[in-house]
Amino acid sequence: MTFRLETKKLHISSNVMNQSWFLVAILFLFVTLTYFPTFSGEFILDDHTLIENNPHVRDASSIPSYFAQEDGITDRRDVPGYHTGYYRPLINLTYWVDYKIWGMSAPGFRTSNLILHLLTCLVLFKTILLMIGDRQIAFWASLIFAVHPANTETVSWVSSRNNILVTLFGLGSFYFYVKGLGEGGSKARILSVILFLGALFSKEFGIMLLPIFFFYQIAFTKKKKNLSTSWKGYLPYLMTLLLYFLLRVNVTHSLLTPSESGDLLRRLYFLPYVLAFNLMIVFLPHDLHSLIIHYPPTYLNPQAIFGFAVASLFVVFLCKERKDKIILFSLLAFGVSIFPVLQVVPTSAVSLVSMRWLYFPMAFLFIGLFQFIYRSLKSKSFLTLSMLGLVSIYLGGYAATLNQSLWHDEEKFFQREVLFFNNFFYAGGLAETFYEKKAFAKAEKYFKISLRHYPKGAKNYMNYAALLIDTGRPKEALAVLDKARSLPMTHGEQGQWFNNAGMANFQLKEYGHALAKFLKAVEYAPQNDQFWANLGGAYGEMGDYADSVRALKRGLEIRPDSKQVLKNLAMTYVRMGKHKEAISLMEGMPQRVLESMGMDELKAEAKRALESQM
């Protein structure tokens, strides 16, 4: 009696373990724990430009207007002379939705990324279950994809959301494509086309779904099927693609993204090396960070030989496993989906390899990979589960570490990239963090390193000039700014250039030159309250108090709590003899702010002057 009861309990437990809802719940719990540090993370890198200071995100716009925006351009005045070539209208639209839900809260935006990642893992689970019919394979493939440390760049860095969205919509489109082929229903096919459009509107990778569909049809449908019937099945996708390109050309004025010209022979020769590096990230994840990878300096070197060896093994494995349709399709889909980032067609990216570019291809790779693992270890189920469990724990732990130590905030990011990995691409960012802490010697050291390695970055020249001004070296600052004058800059960057040049002139007591520079600064960047503060200060120094007040009040319209604007306005009121207005302005400010800005003495001076008038 007792033995039968225990057996029944074991049977029930086994049934629960095989239920999809239970496996998905474990998946969601594991992923949430892995990405727990993201709930307190900050905006980093491009998040400031593309989200925090992006008017398309902050300002209310009609939904159709997002389909007339070029991704990466936040100031429409930059469009005539500059194009990113990225047409991803859904990205800013999702950011705008986030802003309505969370406000400008980095943890909120990061939470949305995590939710989208979880949904992508769920769709991957459902897709593998549909193709293979094995919950265990679907669970382990989606779990290890979910916690793979290479995906931390995509999930934790908000600006990398385009990779999540194209994968979410792409997998969804593929799922309904497979379902439509199997069931023959029009509903699944319509949903597949709609999600295909969503993938295209998220990132250019979506185009690669068409050959993926074709490979699946060749592998899993009867070869005697009428060719004309097969062709007709692709017409809705081709019409959708045509619509995408018409909208894209209208907005970006190009079919493809702008790219650097390069040696085609060199790109083809090192293609195996780039492929090998990507595979190494997937199968041997270690020392992962924001990679800046360039071509090897010579054709005959260990890196090239390693690339040819790995590519050869990949081809041999493909040939050996060609009879397993799942594995064959998976490897072909991976090869197609990773092709855009193998640099055969050159891009303007600063690196040959990036972890975030693997998010979309890796989803298709894992379908066949886990089919192979389970098939190879089918008779050793305990060994298989133990091995996959240990791999999951390792990858999840590594991903959690990266989320905390690398992708959490900019200070940690820059220190780890520059000091740990010698990645001098971010030396300017590290210099900025030291500058904000007033560690000027360290900041100057890394500004110089950044300019030595990347002399075409205008931003680093301007930031270094700001440091020189703050340390009383305005002539050196002007010399540094002069080196940046001919470099390409956005309107916002040009505003910063004129502002910094104006500050240097102001420090040299060249008030006329300073005033002219500040006027240009607010012309280029009229929404920057600091520029209006400096313009108002210049007017005040020249005795033009009426224009000083007008400029400073304009700054307060932009940001009512701007400390520098409030300080300059209070000083102008004191100079004008309007001590009551000055006192009223400063009494509305916390005492700690007055002390930090050196305004407590100004307040006392205004009070003494007012008392003497009574």
Image: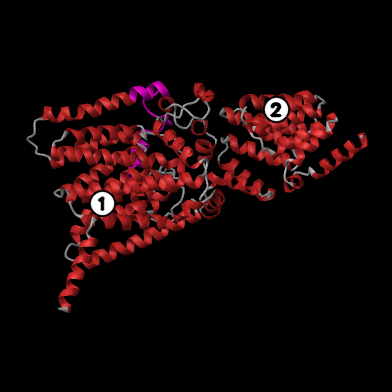
Vertical placement of residue 243 versus 199, above or below: above
Distance between the alpha carbons at the discs numbered 1 and 2? 61 Å
Q: Amino acid at mark 2?
A: Phe
Q: How many neighbours does mark 1 have within 10 angstroms: few (below 14), some (14-19), or many (20 or more)?
A: few
Q: Is residue 291 visible?
A: no
Magenta residues span 245-272
What residue did someone put label 2 on? 518
What residue do we see at 78% from left, 44% from top? 598
Q: Position of residue 80 (x, y in %)?
A: 50, 21
What residue do we see at 54% from left, 45% from top? 426
Local secondary structure at mark 2: helix
The stretch drawn in magenta includes residue 264: yes
Q: Is residue 247 left or right of residue 590?
A: left
**In the rendered view of the protein, which quadrant contains the N terminus?**
bottom left
Q: Nearer the viewer, residue 401 or 4?
A: 4
Label located before the other in sequence (1 or 2): 1
User: Which quarter of the picture shows residue 454?
Assistant: top right
Local secondary structure at mark 1: helix
Q: Is residue 341 left or right of residue 457?
A: left
Q: Nearer the viewer, mark 1 or mark 2?
A: 2
Q: Is residue 484 left or right of residue 295?
A: right
Q: Is residue 498 left or right of residue 143?
A: right
List the single residue furthest toward the front: 614
How has the structure been colored for display? secondary structure
Q: Nearer the viewer, residue 236 or 82?
A: 236
Q: Are marks 1 and 2 in contact (CB under 8 Å)?
A: no
What residue do we see at 72% from left, 30% from top? 552
Vertical placement of residue 290 versus 515, above or below: below
Q: Amino acid at mark 1?
A: Leu
What residue did someone put label 1 on? 313
